[in-house]
Amino acid sequence: MKGTNLGEFEELVLLTIATLVNDAYSVAICDELEKHAGRSAKLGVVHAVLNRLEDKGLVKSTLGEATSTRGGKRKRYYTVTNGGKAALIRAKEVRDQLWNRIPDLILKKA
Amino acid sequence: MTQKNKIQPPRWAQRLLHWYCKPELAEDLEGDLNEYFERNIATKGARRARWIYVVDVFKFFRLYTIRKPEFVNLLLHWIMIGSYVKTSGRSLLRHKLFSFINIAGLAVSMSVGLLVIALVSELVSFDDFHEKKDRIYRVITSDQRQGEPRMDLATTSLVAGRKIEASVSGVEELTLVRNGFSGDAHIGESVIPVSAVWADEHFFNVFSFPLLQGDPATALKEPYSLVLSEKMCKTLFGDVNVLGKSVLFDTTNYVVTGVVKDVPKNSHLRFDALVSFSSAKEHREAGAYLDSWSHIYSVCVYVVLPKGSDPATLQANLDKLSAAENAGIERRTISLELQPLGNIALGKNLSNQIGPVMRPVALYFFEGLALVIILSAGFNYTNLSIARSMRRTREVGIRKVMGALKHQVGWQFIVESTIIALMALVIAFLLFLFLRGQFLSLDRFLSDLVSLELTPRMVLYFVLMALVVGFGSGLLPAVFFSRINAIQVLKGSSALRIFRHVNLRKALIVVQYCFSLIFITTTLIGYNQYKSFLTFDLGFNTAHVLNIRLQHNKEELIKKELAELPEVGAMSVSRIVTSLGSFQGSTMKYKDLNDSSMAWLNYVDEQYLPLHGHKFLAGKNLKALPEGAEESEVVVNEQLLKRFNISPQDPAKALGEVITMDKKKLTIVGVVKDFHYGTVESKIEPMALRYSAHEPWGYINAKVTTNDWPATRARIEAAWKKVDKVHPLDAKFYEDQIEDAYRMFATMIKVIGTIAFLAVCIASLGLFGMVVFTTETRLKEISIRKVLGASEGRLIYLLSKGFFFLLMLAAAVALPFTYFFFDKVILVNFVYHPPLGCLELVISLVSVTLIALLMIGSQTLKVARANPSEVLKSE
């Protein structure tokens, strides 16, 4: 069912928004992703994902105050909605359940 | 924030982003890009940062960012177009002179464009009616002999064709075609000469020439089968139901096994009749001269590749085949190549072409010419419209005040130029119809190659071209006018700084006039020289001489018939007709047997020299020889005496001297005054006239005096028919033949003349735009001068002198250039030509000046005549 499931990258972005709390705008998200997930995040890709998440109702966005940086352009801040939180929790639960079902032996070997 | 020189991202990229992006996303996106840009400047430098910015702008062009077109806007747009058309129409009518000049200028140049479009679209459509056109290839040959330049042929050897058919895989169908069958077809009593093409039984599997009657699979199978085109059927039988009828060629009977629809003009293969390939003995028999790998000059091989197969595989197989066969020949490499069917008509230069082809280079030349002409006409339109801006800025200002948006003003001007272009198209089309006839009659090759008939697709291209030209030439005025600041204009400040590049425009005009002058002078000089070639004193008399090609008939019989006609006077026989550029020669020797030299020859009978009025400097004419007698006499020219030093000062002493030619001893019996054996391009060289009364491939030269040539021709034709029923009479007046021999020059003069006309049109338009611009900007100044007492004449002088200076500058460059070009480059090639006069230079200068005077005068007079109080009052 498209629309309810979170893709891997979508989940990462959503989590990053949650960690950044009040400071989550596109460039910061990119930087954060690069720092913590250790992968290069292209602005265009992140933008597309943010747009999609907003369409799905998992995040909402507001324009911030104009500042002197960025050529005077306002930033668009993202916050995780309740639906977003639910989706994150569900994703985590699914994983945890699966993790719990893995016998200890197997993962220790690996 | 510091106000120091900050590096900015590219403006156009920013604008592009705002143009396509949804407004609600644009701000944030641009901010992000700016942030990255600043970061990149710090880490990667300005250049790279800018580059990344641009790339990112393009990367953001995604489905979710693109602004959706708004329906209401579109609707408004359509409604506005109606308004644009209306107001444009009004503006065209109000400025009739401008509209007329613009339309005429565009029409003239567009007609050339139409011609090129017609030519190109017809050439591109060549051979596109074959069902398997994408899979048909011709096997062509390149022949590399050691130490000689490579030769590329459209033909290949019969052996290659047979081997490919038998042993090379990857060929679905193959057909062998050979040009050059000719014979006289006997049907009942009538005899008609027929030329045909040999083709084997697979011919109709490869090519889609529809058969009206007969079975395509078997029509060309049996030897002595004949497939006729509809047209040929009608000439031979007067009917198309001819299946099974027989036609006798020489002694062989051919049976008609099929009737094929007439071959369309856009086919590189052209034929009126097909003869089955197996009919020719040399095609069937082993060991015949065609049965050799190195005889690559006769047969065309066409193959059809299976669907979806790669020609490279077949090419590899062909390479293997030629490698194996080349082992059997020495010092020579023959290789086979595949040429796609679509590349044949417009393809590379090959010898032994089976049909007419056009070199792409020639086409590029035409396309380039048309492009230059249309571009300069379009530029002139732009120039003129902006020059008129003085008048229209106010209109635009009011529009803007009323609420017109930038792009709406822009569209207004583009619609206007498009309307002008479409109107020009109508005139251009009429011009095209005229030009087409002229173009096709330029050269028989062209009329043979294409017909330039109109097709719906061509008309579509025409309209498309007009739209492109209209849009292109309207674009700059549109941008210019849409930028106008309404307040400034309405306040009446004429301080609009338009076109700071006036010097550039002046230079352009000088260049345009240079070309006009060069082309006009070239046309005039060329025409003068050409006329002089036609009336050149060749050293003998060509008036009233009718040359009749004998076509292997007995000259006595023809002479006997002709002698009965009252119009025909004396008659003679000659092997070639001199002074037309055909030569025949042989080496000759005088006393010194080691000193041999080439002398040009003509074989004539005893009537020839008196009939053509050759002047004898010494001696007498050749004597008539009885049948079978050994020839012993020769008449020579002065140059021959000079060459061998046989008493060149006193020709009389040369009489009786013996020269050796073709191992025959010939006594000089006469010396004629030098005459032009070749064309006037070549020097007069040593020449000898020898006796021969029988020249089956030669000519009868008959003095014909008549006032009613068509009637006389009909009578001569009737007389000819009595002797030869098969071949049509081929008779031309000597003077017409001379004109034919110099036809190339007539063609060149026509082409250059047309270009001259175009150049003058375009240059005049450019000048006109300049004059209008200058006079309108100086309107106020002129008025004040007038108020202060300047006369009209003075004012006209004041306004015109700058332009005359430009014109004189152009003349100072163009005229000496043309003169020296002709004197040192062109006319050097013509040994005998009248001296180069200055008259042509003067005529061309005067005519161009007159036209320019008209352009300048009409405008300056208008301004000079204007009532100064009217002009000054309105300020």
Image: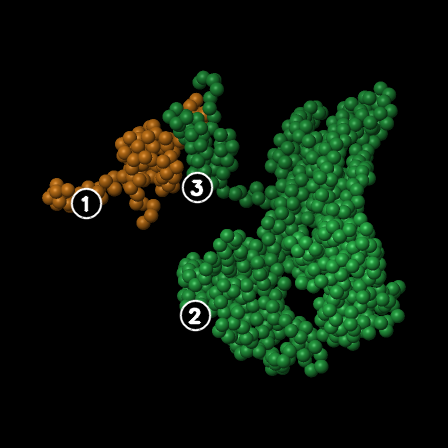
Chain colours: A orange, B green
Which mark is in front, 1 or 3?
3
Residue hosting label 2? B166
Q: Position of residue B638 (x, y in %)?
A: 78, 52
Residue A60 % position (x, y): 37, 35
Residue visible at 74% across and 71% down?
B629
Mark 2 or mark 3: which comes first in sequence? 3
In the figure, residue B764 lies in which quadrant?
top right
Residue B805, relative to residue B822: is it above or below?
above
At a point 60% along the width and 62% down the height, the residue shown is B355
Q: Residue at x 69, y 60 (%)?
A: B661
The residue pinned by badge 3 equals B62
- Using residue B33 as the reference point, say whether residue B775 is left or right of it: right
Label 2 marks which chain's residue?
Answer: B
Q: Are marks 1 and 2 on the same chain?
A: no
Asked whether the viewer can see residue B443, the reply is: no
The amino acid marked with disc number 1 is Leu
Asked if residue B372 shows in the view, the reply is yes
Between tags 1 and 2, which lies in front?
Answer: 2
- Disc 1 chain ID: A
Secondary structure type for disc 1: helix
Cα–Cα span, label 2 and label 3: 57 Å
The residue carrying mark 1 is: A98
Specify whether disc 1 shares its chain with disc 3. Answer: no
The reply, left or right, for residue B340 in relation to residue A108 is right
Q: Residue at x 81, y 51 (%)?
A: B650
Cα separation, mark 1 vs mark 3, equals 37 Å
Q: Position of residue B29 (x, y in %)?
A: 43, 33
Mark 2, secondary structure of its residue: helix
Kind of residue at disc 3: Arg
Q: Is label 2 on the same chain as label 3?
A: yes
